[in-house]
Structure formats: structure tokens, C-alpha cells
Image (cartoon, rainbow, N blue to C red):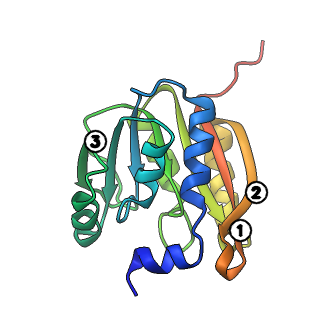
Amino acid sequence: MSYDDELKSNNYSTPKRCAKALKKYLTDSNSHILDIGCGTGLSGQEILNVGFKNVDGTDFSDKMLYEAKNKNIYKRLFNLDLNSNFYNVNFNYNAIVAAGIISPHHANPSCLEKCLNILCDSGLLVFSLNDHAVEDKKFMDKIFMIIDKNYQILEKTYGDHLPGIELNSFVYVLKKGKNQIK
């Protein structure tokens, strides 16, 4: 069974939930969006499905990027290790989507901080945390330390992730920058 087939057989819902949350806060269909940890393009397809036109994708696996390229979802695809010390991306995006990739055994919390350098001012970051990640207190402490310092939470919703195995996730919509208290 392929990666896509396995996820589809378990009704992988997070990419659709992330895309819908993004559309709620970013209405310009010409906005530039980066799908980090894009894998084979399941998330990118959902972003296109809600009406966005300019979606780039990145993953650390050349095999996944090859599969995504064959689906013609992304304007541009490139290799990026989300756990590297620096993201050398020469473009600022209106939004970044990280569906199903931030977890204790995949992308570290520090990737939320590194996204700041490639987001436009007031840019949006949409990401998910599944039940397994949320259960890891040290991991979540690091996540919230970064969020509290750098972002404003616009939305946090809980729902299906992989209903086929009864796994749920939170979807967060963050805005770069903090509210100024006067």
C-alpha cells in the first residue's frame, strides 16, 4: 500500500481542515503559500481545492518531492529539512501550512520559529498537532514558548486527523507578530 493509499484508507482529514482554516483568514486567492513537509502533495491539493493558486511545496524527501511533482499541484518544489538550523528560502510567503508534520518524531518545535523568517509581516501559519504530540508535555511547552513570543493565535480547533485509527488533531491558525498592548 502506498503512502497516499494508507492515509486515504484512514480518511486523513487534517490537510482539508488546515486548508479550510487558511481560507477563513486569507481571502486573496493569489496569495503565496508554502506547504512545508508537503510529502506527496495531499495538503497542497486541499489548498488548491479551496481556491488558492500560488502554492509552493517543500519536503526533505526527494522521493516525496518527485511524487508531488508528478501531480502538478505546486508552482515550485524544493528540498528543505525542517529540523535544519536555517531555512535558506529567498521568498516571503503570505502563509505557511504545516499539515501533520510537527510532532516529537518529525519536525521540531523550532520550525515554528524558523518560519518567521519566511513569512511576510502579519503572515499566517497554519499547522496541526495530533493527539500523540499533545500528550508530550515537554514538546508542547516548547511549542507554546515559541507561539507566545512570536505569534497571535487566531484559531485553535480540535477534530479528525485519522478517523480510521481514531486519532484526532488540533489545527492552529497563527498570525506573525503579537498584539501591542496600549
- Going by the numbered disc 2, the residue's amino acid type is Tyr
Residue of label 1: 168
Mark 3 near mark 1, Cβ–Cβ under 8 Å?
Answer: no
Q: Give the residue at mark 2.
A: 158
Quarter of the picture containing the C terminus is top right
Closer-to-camera residue (40/154): 40
Contact between marks 1 and 2 (CB within 8 A): the answer is yes
Q: CA distance from mark 3 to mark 1?
A: 31 Å
* Number of the label disc, if any, that sits on residue 89: 3
Amino acid carrying mark 3 in the image: Val
Residue pushed farthest top? Answer: 182
Residue 119: image quadrant is: top left
Tell me, yes or no, whether the two marked residues, 3 and 2, touch with CB atoms within 8 Å. no
**Separation of marks 1 and 2 at Cα, in angstroms:** 7 Å
Q: Which tag is nearer the camera, tag 3 or tag 2?
A: 2
- Which residue is at the front of the view, 83 or 64? 64
